[in-house]
Amino acid sequence: MNLIFFKESLERLDFQPLDKLYKERDFDFFEQVLYSLAFNPESGESNLFVYTYMLRLINLHNNWRIHLSISRLMGVILNHLDGAELIGLYHALEANKLKPMDENILEIILYYNHIPEKILNDSDANIYSNQLLKINPLNKIARRDLY
């Protein structure tokens, strides 16, 4: 997979190659390509335009997986950018609206209570922890978050 090709396509506002990848490949693979385009750990270069592309996907497909992916993108990969973590929490909450009571979504929501900025307050974290325990009573993240 040639990341340079996809990066250049994004810079030309040519979304067709990524759209084709989205339709033809496994979502996990597609997601990893986007994450690689968003941040290069070797150079430290960030590409916020990947977020814009993903917003476009939401407009086309309003899918919980895209919201969850954006949450990871902003909350983990691009969290060094001001405001990115708040955007990440927003998209995690949107994913939860589209697919409530999903273990992965609830875990990423709780992530935002564990970061130093703690943008998810303890009271809300407790609610999400209890939901998560209903799905998986042994979930360590949920058990850690009960106050």
Image (spheres, rainbow, N blue to C red):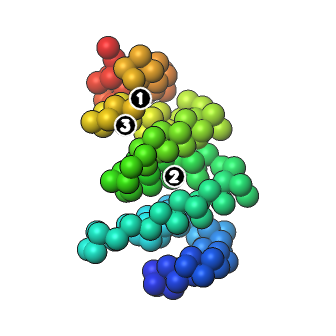
Q: Label 2, label 1: how many angstroms apart (C-alpha)? A: 17 Å
Q: Is residue 63 left or right of residue 127?
A: right
- What residue did someone put label 1 on? 120
Can the viewer see residue 81 in this picture? yes
Foreground residue, 13 or 111?
Answer: 13
**Sequence-wise, which precedes: disc 2 or disc 3?**
2
**Sequence-wise, which precedes: disc 2 or disc 1?**
2
Q: Residue at x 63, y 77 (%)?
A: 13
Q: Secondary structure at mark 1?
A: loop
- What residue did someone put label 3 on? 111
Mark 3: few, some, or many residues within 10 Å (few <14, many ≥20)?
Answer: many
Q: Label 1, label 3: how many angstroms apart (C-alpha)? A: 8 Å
Q: Position of residue 47 (x, y in %)?
A: 44, 68
Three-letter amino acid code at the position of disc 2: Ile
Labelled disc at residue 70:
2
Three-letter amino acid code at the position of disc 3: Tyr
Foreground residue, 96 or 113?
Answer: 113
Q: Specify the quadrant that holds the C terminus.
A: top left
Foreground residue, 69 or 50?
Answer: 50
Q: Residue at x 51, y 52 (%)?
A: 70
Q: Secondary structure at mark 3?
A: helix
